[in-house]
């Protein structure tokens, strides 16, 4: 794997359906923007989740301390550089949707911010439009840049309503519909609060396939959901990664990639 300093920009819409913590089911939509830059090791044994996705039709399991699953953690982007070294970013990532703009603040070397959400009656969703422009000012290590980011690839998670209680000892089949050239990513996981530990799986499939089966031997590594619901946080999340992300350049970066993602997120109980 080729190493170097990589910059990643992610514009993400999360459609969350929560039937575990709320009765009746609560649906919320939130728009996020984030950027991270990091130095990735290269060489024969270089690895990170983004550059080493599982082969189409298969899954990879991860275990970690702390809470690393859930919509607000945007696991694809923020875990993509695990094992690398974050480089300082400049505060003030600016995002424009053609009619309005927003600023993402700096948090621990990562530019990230919620742009809008349906929980706020006065908020208007931001990531609607045919393209978005993201600009950043220069820092001590990364120069100023501008990236044009196309909209997310739409899709429908067709058996979403049937996925609420997941038996970890059985295979789990997920289905979707959509068109375009992309890879469907499925992230599932559970956080166990008493042990402060997370288990998660990442699966990949072609958008055209329309289905993937998560084997039981992958899910058996997940901590089971607690009877006291507030002690667990189980999710399954699905999105489509475009086959050709947008690219951008900046002084100090070996490569810059940018994309928009539509996530469908579901709270689940893992039994």
Image: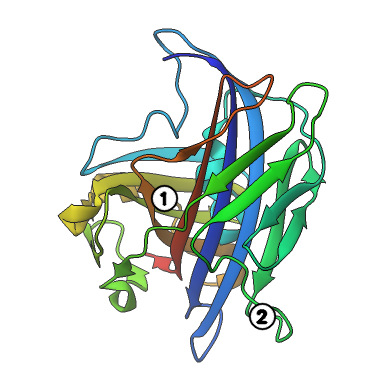
Determine the residue located farthest toward the bottom in the rendered image.
24
Res 126 → quadrant: bottom right
Give the mark, 2 or 1, whose residue is nearer the N terminus.
Answer: 2
In depth, the one of 260 and 190 nearer the eye is: 260
Q: Is residue 41 above or below residue 62?
A: above
- What residue is shown at x 31% (from left), y 69% (from top)? 157
Image coordinates of residue 205 in percent, x first then y, are: 25, 47
- What residue is shown at x 24% (from left), y 53% (from top)? 207
Which quarter of the image is occupied by the C terminus? bottom left
**Residue 194 seen in render:** no
- What residue is shown at x 80% (from left), y 44% (from top)? 106
Crowd rating for badge 2 (residues with CA inside 10 Å; few <14, some 14–19, many 20+):
few
**Disc 1: which residue:** 222
Q: Secondary structure at mark 1?
A: loop
Which numbered disc, 2 or 1, marks the residue closer to the eye? 2
Determine the residue located farthest toward the left in the rendered image.
209
Q: Secondary structure at mark 2?
A: loop
Q: Is residue 201 left or right of residue 133?
A: left
Q: Is residue 113 above or below residue 259?
A: below
Image coordinates of residue 237 in percent, x first then y, are: 42, 59
**Disc 2: which residue:** 119
Cα distance, mark 2 to mark 1?
A: 30 Å
Res 41 → quadrant: top right
Which quarter of the image is occupied by the N terminus? top left
Query: Quick check: marks 2 and 1 in contact, CB under 8 Å?
Result: no
**Residue 208 seen in render:** yes
């Amino acid at each position: 794997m080729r190493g170097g300093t990589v910059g990643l920009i992610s514009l993400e819409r999360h459609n969350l359906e929560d039937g575990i913590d709320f009765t009746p089911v609560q649906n919320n939509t939130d728009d996020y923007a984030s950027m991270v830059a990091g130095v990735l090791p290269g060489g024969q044994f270089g690895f990170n989740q983004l550059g080493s996705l599982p082969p189409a039709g298969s899954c990879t399991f991860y275990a970690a301390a702390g809470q690393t699953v859930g919509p607000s953690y945007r696991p694809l982007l923020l875990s993509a550089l695990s094992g690398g070294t974050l480089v300082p970013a400049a505060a003030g990532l600016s995002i424009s949707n053609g009619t309005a703009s927003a600023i993402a603040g700096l948090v621990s070397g990562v530019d990230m911010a919620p742009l809008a959400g349906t929980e706020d009656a006065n908020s208007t969703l931001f990531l609607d439009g045919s393209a978005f422009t993201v600009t950043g000012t220069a820092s001590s290590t990364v120069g100023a840049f501008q990236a044009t980011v196309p909209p997310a690839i739409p899709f429908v998670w067709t058996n979403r309503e049937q996925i609420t209680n997941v038996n970890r000892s059985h295979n789990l089949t997920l289905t979707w519909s959509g068109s375009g050239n992309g890879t469907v990513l499925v992230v599932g996981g559970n956080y166990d609060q008493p042990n402060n530990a997370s288990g998660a799986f990442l699966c990949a499939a072609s958008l055209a396939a329309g289905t993937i089966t998560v084997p039981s031997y992958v899910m058996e590594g997940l901590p089971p959901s607690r009877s006291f619901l507030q002690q667990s946080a189980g999710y399954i999340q699905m999105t489509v990664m475009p086959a050709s992300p947008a690219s951008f350049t900046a002084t100090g970066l070996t490569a810059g990639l940018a994309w928009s993602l539509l996530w469908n997120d579901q709270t689940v109980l893992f039994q």
